[in-house]
Amino acid sequence: MAPPSADLPPDRKAKLWDELVAFLVDPSFGSRTKREIDLKVFELLYRERLERGDLPVGVVAQQLTVPRARARSLVLEARTRLVADEEARARELRRLLQQWARHGEVEREGARLRLVIDDPFVRDLLRNHAYERGLLLDSSFAGEIVSLRWSDYAALIASLLDERHAAELEQQLGAELRKRLAKDEERAQAFERELAAWKSEPAPERVKRTVAAAAPYVPWGTLAALFVGALR
């Protein structure tokens, strides 16, 4: 595989060189560690793809002829530095959760979603966000494969929405469930009692509970469409 600089035009290479030299002499030449220099060169070579979040670890490993663990470490640290503010990190999470609804694999029993997350930065971001809210993620099979329940996925989405939009998602989910329970009066009444019981809870928790109730009845494609719509 060609190195990352192979397709760069001469003027772009010259600009990168100037930026690298400026980095090396600030604050004084020789003050930068090898690790800092390696990371800066990596950032310069891949900055646009790092900012877009479309740089696979495998591509880095092949182009730089380094082990996958080293490539993963470079991507993680460079992305962590480039995507530093809270708003940018929220955008990364929204993008991931939209991708999960569109491309995630529904496990056989239909109660969980599974997705390969190659980007170590996004994977860490997701774990930190989920664990802070008491939501369980499972990556026991492989670090890059993350699995979670529909209800926890919905709670993650609701945590990125304001109260109004989270309440709208809750209402849409409830409406879908009521349609599916139109001929099951006993279960429909039980759902309405449950809905009243958690009425005073925060929006993310209400959404989580509504999805837990809806998942056995509402097709996963319908749930996914509602989730993607809420994140737009």
Image (cartoon, rainbow, N blue to C red):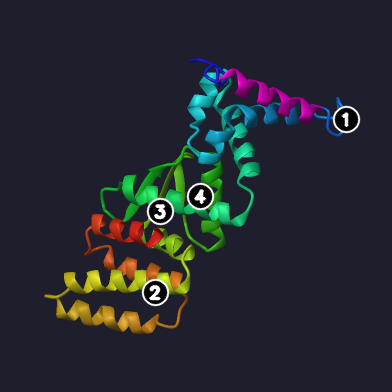
Sequence order check: which comes first, mark 4 or mark 1?
1
Q: Secondary structure at mark 3?
A: strand
Q: CA distance from mark 3 to mark 4?
A: 18 Å
As helix, strand or loop, the secondary structure at mark 4 comes to: helix
Residue that mark 4 sits on = 92
State which region is magenta: 9-24
Judge whether residue 11 is colored magenta.
yes
Residue at label 2?
Answer: 167
| Residue 52 horizontal side relative to residue 150, left or right | right
The residue at 81%/29% (across/down) is 32
Kind of residue at disc 4 = Glu
Q: Going from the N terminus, do you reach mark 3 or mark 1 first?
A: 1
Q: Where on the picture, by quarter, is residue 191?
A: bottom left
Residue 8 point in image, percent of width and height:
55, 21
Horizontal arrangement in the rendering, residue 158 relative to residue 49 (left or right): left
Q: Is residue 151 left or right of residue 34?
A: left
What residue does disc 3 label? 148
Question: Does 19 sit left or right of 210 as displayed?
Answer: right
Indicate whether 1 appears above or below 112.
Answer: above
Q: Is residue 66 above or below residue 102?
A: above
Cβ atoms under marks 2 and 4 closer than 8 Å? no
Provide the major secondary structure of the magenta segment: helix
* Magenta highlight on residue 59: no
Q: Quadrant of the C terminus?
A: bottom left
Q: Residue furthest left?
A: 183
What's the distance in space between the residues labelled 4 and 1, CA to CA? 35 Å
Residue at 61%, 33% (x, y): give it.
73
Label 2 is placed on what type of residue?
Answer: Ala
Label 1 secondary element: loop
Q: Position of residue 11 (x, y in %)?
A: 62, 21
Q: Which residue is mark 1?
A: 28
